[in-house]
Amino acid sequence: MTRLATCACGSIRVTCASEPTKVSVCHCLDCQKRTGSSFGVAAFFDRDTVRIEGPTKSFSRQSDSGFPVTFHFCPDCGSTVFWKPQRKPGAVAVAVGSFADPDFPAPTQTVYSERRHSWLDMCD
């Protein structure tokens, strides 16, 4: 199955020619700030099955594991569409919301649950 993720304005197109290896909900404070929401949801794909088109700007930050993560976002609309964790050089993480697909596979794990907002009840 091929899946297409885009930014809000459509300038960035990420075509994933496989199923995700993992779908993860992250409750860390950095993901909360990055998304402007209470959590982030990422689908991880093997890098060699992902094609990225369009201009991006990037922002890198250290992760708790000590490895940097580089986030790529649209220079026009600001949507963060994908990121590359240096800890997993063979992977690309794609923001699940960028697929705009309510039938996208459900998360299989949560991380940083201790920072989860108390009113959330998912993936327990």
Image (cartoon, rainbow, N blue to C red):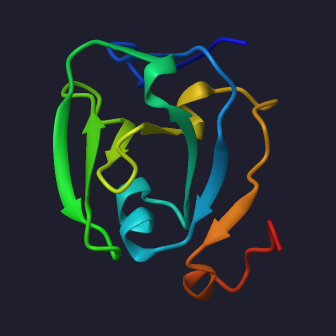
Give the residue at x 78% y 37%. Answer: 105
The percent position of residue 74, horizontal first and vertical second, equals 26, 28
114 with respect to 77 (left or right): right
107 with respect to 56 (left or right): right
Give the residue at x 55% y 33%. Answer: 45
The percent position of residue 34, horizontal first and vertical second, equals 36, 57
Q: Is residue 105 above or below residue 1?
A: below
Foreground residue among 101 and 94: 94
Q: Quadrant of the C terminus?
A: bottom right
Give the residue at x 60% y 26%. Answer: 99
Foreground residue among 56 and 37: 56
70 with respect to 103 (left or right): left
Give the residue at x 76% y 55%. Answer: 108
Determine the image quadrant of residue 72: top left
Determine the image quadrant of residue 61: bottom left
The percent position of residue 73, horizontal first and vertical second, equals 28, 35
Foreground residue among 51 and 28: 51
The percent position of residue 115, horizontal first and vertical second, equals 55, 84
